[in-house]
Amino acid sequence: LYRAIYTYGSWHATNKWPPCKNLTPLCGSCNVEDETKALLVEFDVDHGDFPPKVLKDVEQSVKSGRFYEKSGSSSEEDMGWKPTEEMLRGRRDYRNHRVFTIDPTTARDLDDALHITPLPDGRVEIGVHIADVSHFIQPDTAVDEEALRRATTVYLVDRVIPMLPRPLCEIACSLNENVERLAFSVVWRMNMDGTLSKKGEKEKCKKDEIWYGRTVIKSCSRLDYATAQNIIDGKVATGEKVVDETLWPKSRQPTGGHTFDEVAADVRLMHKVAMARRKLRFENGALALNGIKLAFQLEEDGETPKLCAPYPIRDSNRLIEEFMLLANYLVAQRLITHAHGRALLRNHSPPIELGLQNVVEVSKASFNFDIDITSSQSLQESLNRLCRECDDELIVQSVTESLMTPFRPAEYIAAGELDEAEWRHFALNIPYYTHFTSPIRRYPDVIVHRLLQATLDDNVDEFPQNSSEIHAVASHCNGKKMAAKKAQERSDRVFLSLYLKSNPISSALGVCLGVGEKTFTVFVPSLGMSTRVFLEEHEDVFDVNAFEDSNGKRKIVIRPKTNVVPGMQSDDGVEGSSSSSSWKSLDIGVFTKLEVSCFCKAQPPIDVKVMVVGPWKE
């Protein structure tokens, strides 16, 4: 693999490859280490080790609460951490509340924990407790500057490039089970139907319905999404005396005197409230375009993919999503009313209208379905209607994938640098939003924590950054977040390519999503992947005719050059032994179903290659 310099704007439509200069060798290809090195450099996330001055800052921030303890039968000692009495001063104490976490199975940096308490009036109290990272990272220190430079943790298939050093992200800050941790919390009351309570709605309240502040917690259980789903589905903790450890692993069972039934009851109550809240959100115009994400299981060498499958999104994922969305919204509300122009928000601009209109026109022409793109609510209602009226799930997947292309990414902003109308979050269909819930892995959340504390201390005017400076930080974080996303997608592609190298797919369903002059885009649902297919690479097998029809739409027609090509069968059903093919011609337009083969590209850089076999046979 090589590194080269490309001048933006010099790649013309007639060139297959971009013109580059200053070509220099970088590393090898077609193996995990070299491909990962290349993607880290390509997307400028090759952060390397933390500098000594950063580690010195971390040492200073954790040493007063640090201790060491032996790890099982090993003679080695593991680092532990516990807040001192001085650190607890002024914090609300939730150590005796039944607080727990729900995260991916492999998660090590646990940002968020929750509690739920039924109230006598039929409402519930919800507590979202977030790692108090800003306690450990003071402004303008070396660790603060390094966290800003990195801006986000980068998650690749086989490794994590953290924003913070391990003593913080995995130990002192991480809300691990059965240990005391410092948190920044939002606690509110809500109704079982998902609506937020208002003062005087049920009774006169002596305190605010929404409370923000620093806390100390002691998580009683480290649940993962699979275990939480087993609880929701009633597969475990339904009154049995002995819990099945395959459904609720021992390492995730309750500590601190809390019982299985108590934690399970909390999870089920949270699920009930969260699903009511989710229903309410979509009724009020929220939009969800959920693409397919692959998950990999690696061999013991940590490099070779042995299993590749779509990552399942369960109700347990949605449970966490609903409460994090609401906590973020409530913090945004506080920042706007108290931090004003300094409020660091996350906006989402409407999608590119021309791109959406193209999907509307193609959907109408292909299967006579009308999509209303007037607003996020009308768009979601159209998708819901498509799900109800269409028996073909593939069409729903393909339309959803097509709609994602014209969507702009959400971005961080400072409220004072944009008009109020530009604060809006299109997909969530709410007037403002922020990120508060993941400060271990997102630097904007650290700024939000500092701003929130400034509003509680009533000293926002003394905040060290003005709105312009906060907006500049937000812009930097936008760039780094996008780079991390691209690095993660490239890592997924590398491991998918390696998986296909050992497990090529000779026949898979593909759907055309777009047609160009010399290429077309194919979506392969089983791999959750869209990729470009080049016509010239099929010229040995097919006669290709690419043209523009009378309506100005790009079309491609392919015809087998010989009687024996992939996808052809003889009259007796034996592939490749016939003197006549089973298909003569294939018109390829948007939403055309194709039979494709998927394998690893032979030449570096490593990638997935998709080739057309023929028309898809239902």
Image (cartoon, helix red, strand yellow):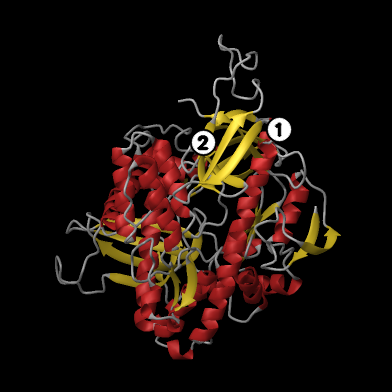
Is the residue marked by circle 2 packed among few (<14), some (14-19), or many (20+) residues within 10 Å? few
In which quadrant is the C terminus drawn? top left
Instruction: Please report the residue visible at 60 percent of the width from the left and 16 percent of the height from the top.
Output: 580
Q: Which residue is mark 1?
A: 540
Picture coordinates of residue 523, whole percent (x, y): 53, 42
Q: Which residue is mark 2?
A: 587
Mark 2 residue element: strand
Going from N to C along the chain, the mark reached first, 2 or 1, is: 1
Q: Using the image as rendered, state which of residue 508 and residue 16 is in the foreground.
A: 16
Q: Using the image as rendered, state which of residue 386 and residue 318 is in the foreground.
A: 386
Mark pair 2, 1: CA separation:
18 Å
Contact between marks 2 and 1 (CB within 8 A): the answer is no
Q: 480 above or below 466?
A: above
Asked if residue 62 can be seen in this view, the reply is: yes
Picture coordinates of residue 80, whole percent (x, y): 61, 59
Q: In the image, is 199 to the left or to the right of 432?
A: left
Asked if residue 220 can be seen in this view, the reply is: no
